[in-house]
Image (cartoon, rainbow, N blue to C red):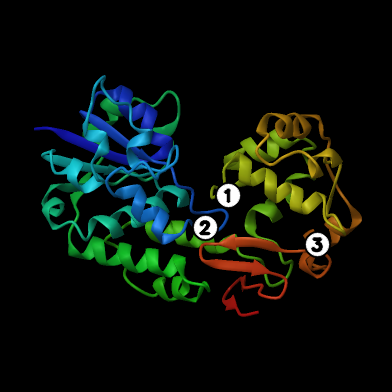
Amino acid sequence: MKRLILTGWAGGSELARSGLAAIVIPFHFQFAWGPLPPAEKLSAYFAAYTTDLGPAEHWSDWVRWPQGAMERKLSLAEFCERYDTIELWFAATARDQLQLVWLLDHLSSCPALTQKLGLRLLDSDLMFSPDYDCAKAEPHIPVVDVGAEEFEIAKLAWSAYRAPTPEACIDLLHRDLGALLMLRPALLELLAELPSPLTGLGATEMRFLEMLAWYANTNALFHLRSLRGTFVFGEIELGYLLEGLALGPRPAVAGLGDELRTIDLQNLRARHQVYLRSRLSLTEFGKAVLAHREDFSRYNPIDRWWGGTHLTNERLWRYGAVLTKP
């Protein structure tokens, strides 16, 4: 039996080393930050390779290929047809669950593959830690067939997340999502990152303010994940959120290096060095926001994306007990 594994980006290296499958294909798109890629770009990613594509714009660009492999020019569906079993290994994180529903939305139009698909029920992201032994853990991770119900939920979720408002995602929470067990918690984590009705900040931004009562460096804010308790964003995105709190017209955080204003966003090494040198603290305004006495968005520009929703000061969808329209 030839086995193929499709996985989230974080799991690619460990699964490739595990020997569990002939080929492991990781997916790299990050859908939790920034504008979503155009539909044409996502379609081209799955389609047969063409010379019009740039580096890292095709699914095959992320695979550890055996020397001389020619299959990398195929569409993903054509490549998958060569395998007897196709397993989906996606963690319970919001990032992986978004990749999963996007992938299932695409695979739902490939009937030749549906009988081969199995979904591993991973209840955490522990599998992606450096000391995780995928081969040893594999017999204990349940696998379920992917059928019509899984495809339907995935298509609904991907369409809802791409919508220009979060309303469809709220509606989705009123459905039975049991076919994709990790989707509901991921949706709730994503919704918590919408601005609060009281403070104008999302869950991670508020946790930053809370943690600054005890910590003064970015390492703690970025890497103490279990203490922070929010898991949607990676280190780069966390840096952007911190800069928004510290470098606006009325900052909630003091001490972040002002030179970040002029360092290119792609110069990650230089930006990281500034983060390491910074010693952070709450401003008086930050303390007022933390105490729910001030709304951060009243004094500072908001310009970021939540799925297909463009959040600005004029179009600030907020989420607390309920979703609040601008």
Q: Is residue 120 above or below residue 38?
A: above
Q: Is residue 85 visible?
A: yes
**Closer to the camera, 192 or 5?**
5
User: Hey, which quadrant is residue 12 in on the image?
Assistant: top left
**Closer to the camera, 318 or 63?**
63
Image location of residue 146, percent across then percent down: 19, 54
The answer to whether marks 1 and 3 mark residues whose Cβ atoms lie closer than 8 Å is: no
| Left or right side of 121 for 263 | right
Image location of residue 226, percent across then percent down: 57, 41
Distance in Å between CA atoms under marks 1 and 3: 19 Å
Distance in Å between CA atoms under marks 3 and 2: 21 Å
Residue linked to disc 2: 189
Tell me which residue sits at (58%, 73%) in the image: 321
Residue linked to disc 1: 230
Q: Label for residue 289? A: 3
The answer to whether marks 3 and 2 mark residues whose Cβ atoms lie closer than 8 Å is: no
Mark nearer the N terminus (1 vs 3) = 1
Mark nearer the N terminus (2 vs 1) = 2
What's the amino acid at mark 3?
Val
Q: Is residue 326 above or below residue 42?
A: below
SS under mark 1: loop
What's the amino acid at mark 2?
Glu
Tell me which residue sits at (35%, 51%) in the image: 44
Tell me which residue sits at (18%, 48%) in the image: 117
Q: What residue occupies the far top of the structure in this picture?
A: 67
The answer to whether marks 2 and 1 mark residues whose Cβ atoms lie closer than 8 Å is: yes
| Left or right side of 260 for 60 | left
Q: What residue occupies the far right of the structure in this picture?
A: 284
Q: Residues within 10 Å of mark 3 (few under 14, many from 20)?
A: many
Q: Residues within 10 Å of mark 1 (few under 14, many from 20)?
A: some
Q: Is residue 146 above or below residue 191?
A: above
